[in-house]
């Protein structure tokens, strides 16, 4: 799990996963078109994602296609996130907003 969290900690890698979510099976060149970084940087980020099993590759002729593997993210959800009830999260979010609200705003409500 640590390798998955490390891979997800970088915004560029999360952006790559988002790109694969919207259009799975892209080549390195196709992914580079949407990112403001060098081809080598994208390739390094993809290697980290592959090591975390978040991206799998498949050779189709001379092209290497990259696919999103959502299984590790599902495992994170199942282990940590699913145990939190949506109602509890909504109540905590509302409490946080109320506590952070400017006291002058609450006087006028």
Image: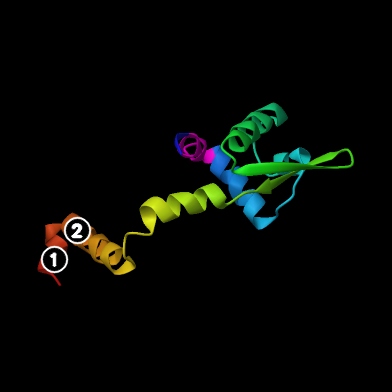
**4 is within the stretch colored magenta:** yes
Which quadrant does the C terminus fall into? bottom left
When asked about the image quadrant of residue 85, the answer is bottom left
Q: Which mark is residue 63?
A: none
- In whole angstroms, how far apart are the C-alphas of marks 1 and 2? 7 Å
Q: How many marks?
A: 2
- In this rendering, is residue 44 above or below 99? above
The residue to which callout 1 is attached is: 106
Q: Position of residue 59 (x, y in %)?
A: 81, 41
Question: Which residue: 38% across, 59% down?
Answer: 82
Q: Which mark is residue 101?
A: 2
Q: Is residue 17 left or right of residue 84?
A: right
Nearest the camera: 94 or 76? 76
Q: Which residues are magenta?
A: 3-11
Query: Which sits earlier in the primary sequence, circle 1 or circle 2?
Result: 2
Q: Is residue 8 or residue 53 the one in the foreground? A: 53
Tell me where residue 106 appears, x and y as whole percent: 13, 66
Q: Position of residue 86 (x, y in %)?
A: 33, 66
Q: Residue at x 68, y 31 (%)?
A: 43
Q: Label 2's element?
A: loop
Q: Label 1: how many residues lie within 10 Å, few (<14), some (14-19) or many (20+)?
A: few
Image marks 1 and 2: residues in contact by CB distance under 8 Å: yes
Query: Within the image, what quadrant is residue 22 found in?
Result: bottom right
Coordinates of residue 8 in the picture (x, y in percent):
50, 40
Mark 2 residue crowding within 10 angstroms, few (<14) / some (14–19) / many (20+): few
Q: How is the image coloured?
A: rainbow
**Left or right of 40 on screen, residue 91:** left
> Of 18 and 79, which appears nearest the observer?
79
Residue drawn at 22 percent across, 57 percent down = 96
Main SS category, magenta section: helix
Looking at this rendering, what residue extends furthest in the right direction? 61
> Is 5 on the left-hand or right-hand side of 109?
right
């Amino acid at each position: 799990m640590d390798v998955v969290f490390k891979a997800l900690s970088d915004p560029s890698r999360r952006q790559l996963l988002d790109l694969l979510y919207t259009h799975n099976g892209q080549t390195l060149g196709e992914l580079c078109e949407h990112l403001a970084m060098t081809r080598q940087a994208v390739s390094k980020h993809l290697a980290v994602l592959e090591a975390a099993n978040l991206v799998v590759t498949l050779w189709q002729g001379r092209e290497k296609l990259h696919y999103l593997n959502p299984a590790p993210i599902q495992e994170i959800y199942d282990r940590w996130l699913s145990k939190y009830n949506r109602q509890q999260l909504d109540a905590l979010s509302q409490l946080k907003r109320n506590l952070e609200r400017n006291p002058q705003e609450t006087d006028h409500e």
